Image (cartoon, rainbow, N blue to C red):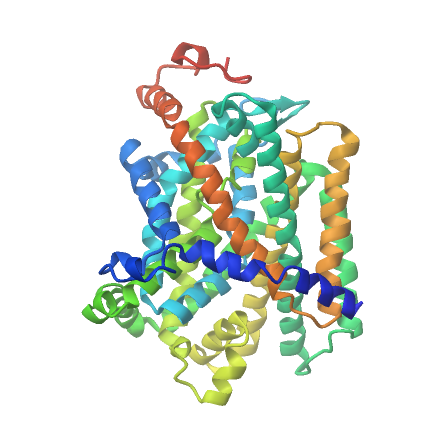
Amino acid sequence: MHPLFQRINDFFAFIQPVSDAVWSFPQQFDAYRAIPLLGQMSFAVLFLLGMGLYFSWRTGFIQALSFSRALPIMLRRRSSGTGLSALASFMLGLAMRAGPGNIVGVTGAITVGGPGALFWMWIAALFGMSTAFMEATLAQLFKEQKGQEFVGGLPFYGRQLLGGHRNIGIVLSVLFIVYALFNVPLQTFNVFTAVGMIAETATGMEAERQSPLYFGIAIALICCCAYLILGGIRRVSAWTNLLVPFMATTFCLVSLAIIVINLPLFPYFIGEVLRGAFSPDAVFGGGMGVALAEGVRRGLMSNEAGQGTITMAAAVADNDHPCEQGLVQGLGVFVDTIVICTLTGFIVIIAHLWSGSADPAQWAEISASRLGVYVSSVQSLVPDSVDAALTILVSLCYALFAFTTLLGMISFAEISANFISRAPAFIVGIRLAGSLCFVPFGAMTVLAGLELGNIWAISDLCNILMVYVNIPILMIGTPIVMKTLQHYRLGHGSFVSAQHGFRTEHWV
């Protein structure tokens, strides 16, 4: 199997340079790089921040409304027996957002861009809340009913806003399915990494890739995924309703305990973040551009605002008004980045391992894994008597982050596939492809002892491609969202799309 996997990895060798080129454009050109400050920022970074700022301005900074309205909406009982509740949709979306990127993404951003990267993650998230509102509201507006469930998302509103041509929706659906399913092996790999670290910490011995432990993980993971995914969206949602609060609460409590132990270092943390973002050396020496680029890039991979991925979770919710799910998903961006990512950032920054100032040989071993950098940071900040227990807890959270993201990817691929065909055989085929093809593929690469960097790079490339596809569609749909938002703010009863100059299948 090893030669086969290696050939597959070699086949995708072109992905990494393409991904780097897309993310860094137009910094490949000397004339652009020579522009003060602006030349430090790629078009992707400017596009994401610019659109977040634009949507914030157009919506009257809808972020404020998310803070006051989203929680009551989630606590309200469902208005009918159709679709998921607002809370279940929020948890399903958070299952995707609260992924390994909350740990390794933040760690990687700080390792490359310094503490200032965390500041730009905050900024990207605050503006990203308005982008999430836009895409979630459009997903609600153009959702369609399938039995006792709703389906919708990017392919559905993309078709309606781009002229109503079915082929447009099919292309968007296929693009998303490819993006989602190719993310599955990466999340499978992350589950193995975390469970392996738990076993190593508990036993004091490092297991070989082809040991009974790893074969056991593979069998258990494939069986769990098949059971949950083949049960459909409702079964997945029922489990994410349990797993997401548990993993998020556990991670936050562990992180807060570490912060309390190291509370005197909090002013140092704030100072490092601000200095890394705005010190003269950072601004004029190029450090600000690196911090900004890494913060926005990893922030996107964490909260996914603007990619269109969370639109699948937004569409399946049963709400009284289309804007409600927009407010709920906007709050999801805040929880993911401003809360969870900040807890990770505090630990990584005050431990100061990210600078590579440790012993060179030790740093080479630690930095080979972003999870290793984070775990080593945790261990350096707590008493030796509890570092093993905390390592197990954070590794467990990491495993659950990866597992729920994995479930979300396959489930959202299924929702998107409903645009192409709602035939039971086709939908089951998508479930089988995700749970019994892509999950086993990820497991087998682990067992073969491979880390297929070229395949994992597909995720990075697809992230920004989804943004370039989705955000222009959001801009086209902005007038519709503004009419819908005006109706919501005025509180004029039930929303009827035809009264506002457009028609939708559900809101009639």
Q: Is residue 272 above or below residue 69?
A: below
Q: Residue 184 at x, y = what percent?
A: 65, 53
Q: Residue at x 74, y 49 (%)?
A: 435
Q: Residue at x 59, y 51 (%)?
A: 405
Q: Is residue 64 above or below residue 142?
A: below
Q: Is residue 505 above or below residue 21?
A: above
Q: Residue 506 at x, y = what percent?
A: 54, 18
396 and 404: which is toward the camera = 404
In this rendering, position of residue 403 left or right of residue 106: right
* Residue 245 in view (yes/no): yes
In this rendering, position of residue 391 left or right of residue 122: right
In this rendering, position of residue 285 left or right of residue 415: left
431 and 489: which is toward the camera = 431
Q: Residue 422 at x, y = what percent?
A: 71, 27
Q: Choose top left, top right, bottom left or bottom right for residue 468.
A: top left
364 and 151: which is toward the camera = 364
Q: Residue at x 46, y 88 (%)?
A: 360
Q: Choose top left, top right, bottom left or bottom right for residue 359.
A: bottom left
Q: Choose top left, top right, bottom left or bottom right for residue 500.
A: top left
Q: Residue at x 55, y 61 (%)?
A: 16
